[in-house]
Image (tube, grey):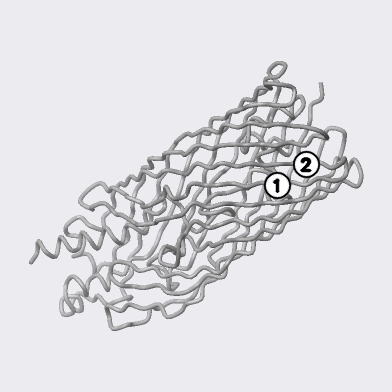
Amino acid sequence: MRDFMNGTLAKVAAALLAVPVFVFVPAERGSAAGFAILEQSSEGIGYAFAGAAAGYGDGSEIAFNPAAMAWIPDTHVSANVDLIIPSAEFKNNGSNNPNLGGIALSGSNGPDGGELAAVPSFYVKSELFEGAHFGLGVHSPFGLSTNYDREWVGRYTAVESELRTVSITPAFSFEVTENFAIGGALNVLYTEATLSNAIDFGTIGFGQLGAAQATALGLAPQQNDGFVEVKGDDWSAGFTLGGSYRYGENSKIGLAWKSKIDTDLRGTADFIVPTAAAPLTGTGLFTDTGATAGVTLPESIALSWIHNFSEEWGVLFETQWTNWDRFEELRVQFDGVQPDAVTPEDWDDVWRFSVAMRYSPAPDWTFSAGWTFDEEPIPGANRRTPRIPGNDRNWLALGMKYQLAEQVNLRATYAHLFVKDGDVIASDSVGNNLVGSFDNSVDLVGLGIDYQFNS
């Protein structure tokens, strides 16, 4: 009986831990599909990132398509800060535990889980010699920040989720002909993440010890919550290859391929266990331990076209494919006695389609407007959680650039993302079943400055 109980407890622990260790592959969402972040350029926000792989001339070519650096003259420096303002309001549609007679899950609906995030980026580009160019960028390609109350109805699924990434990107480009260039970049990525959630030790106690013994210990469903926080970090690397062709009035076509990045994160799991549940830790489960997880961040291909009809008017297009179906499952190995925790994901490949226009009524002023449709890789409600409540989205964007001086440009941009409501059906191993939907939206604000060192 003791061996059976210990084995069952191990399975319960593994299933519960499969949620908190999702810190290693962040959830909720960035502004783009999955947990990606497009905001590598404040100017790009104003175009809804149409034309990004063809190049805006602001240095973000280092992040999107290093070949297009070739068309930035001389030495160029730019700095940006982009604000991501997400909203994720939850509506409870009867969350319950069917294993306990359909008892409703207690707790509030929130508050709004979205949290403001600032995404800075910095680029410097210079000509090494005629036809050869070097650039260096510091930017963030993935991220999230969500935070719910510890007492909310979905606390057993998610409380805090935070992901921060920094990519240090040296890049090169070479002009094969006067109008065609190739380029490459090394993406050295640092990832740091934190994730937490509550654990329903009361229900675990009833299920594993029986009602009489659990009651004697003072355990009761949803009345003896514990807590777990998982942290992890890693250094990893990938690369970008691209080509760029220009014609006419600085019209450009760009094609860029970003490689997958294999990460192998190492972290710790720290538990808070209520006194009444201490007998459940006797076998070493639910105790502080180390954890590792290997995750592959997907490759993508982007094709862009910027066509200028004149100095005043231009149009921009882009399509991007991302291989999110690599994310079939998350498997985490723990130090100590905890077995592997496996969370099925089954994400899909996705496409992004963007179109924008540019209008320059005077040499000092440029205005832009853009639209994007961005698919979400989450296949359905049973694969969506409060850590990943995103869905398909449509962008509407506006931008403005002002030439403050001969060598200085200032930019201010804004976009609103209309995100389709996301239904959620998320269950833990003891039967707590979160059922509801998220009313999602995202606002983006971009500010930037660049300086051109003319020779």
Outermost residue to the right: 362
What quarter of the picture does the C terminus occupy? Answer: top right
For image coordinates 85% across by 40% down, the residue present is 403
Label 1 element class: strand
Label 2 element class: strand
For image coordinates 24% across by 67% down, the residue present is 277
Residue 121, percent across and down?
Answer: 64, 41
What quarter of the picture does the N terminus occupy? Answer: bottom left
What amino acid is labelled 2 in the image? His
Q: State which tag comes first along the sequence, 1 or 2.
A: 2
Residue tagged by mark 2?
307
Q: Do the residues labelled 1 and 2 touch (CB within 8 Å)?
A: no
Q: Nearer the viewer, residue 126 or 242?
A: 242
Residue 193, percent across and down?
Answer: 45, 49
Residue 428, percent across and down?
Answer: 33, 67
User: Does residue 380 appear left or right of residue 2 in this picture?
Assistant: right
| Residue 370 sits in quarter | bottom right
- Mark 2 crowd level (few <14, some 14–19, many ≥20, 10 Å Cα): many
What amino acid is labelled 1 in the image? Phe
Residue tagged by mark 1?
317
Q: Above or below — where is 27 with respect to 252?
A: below
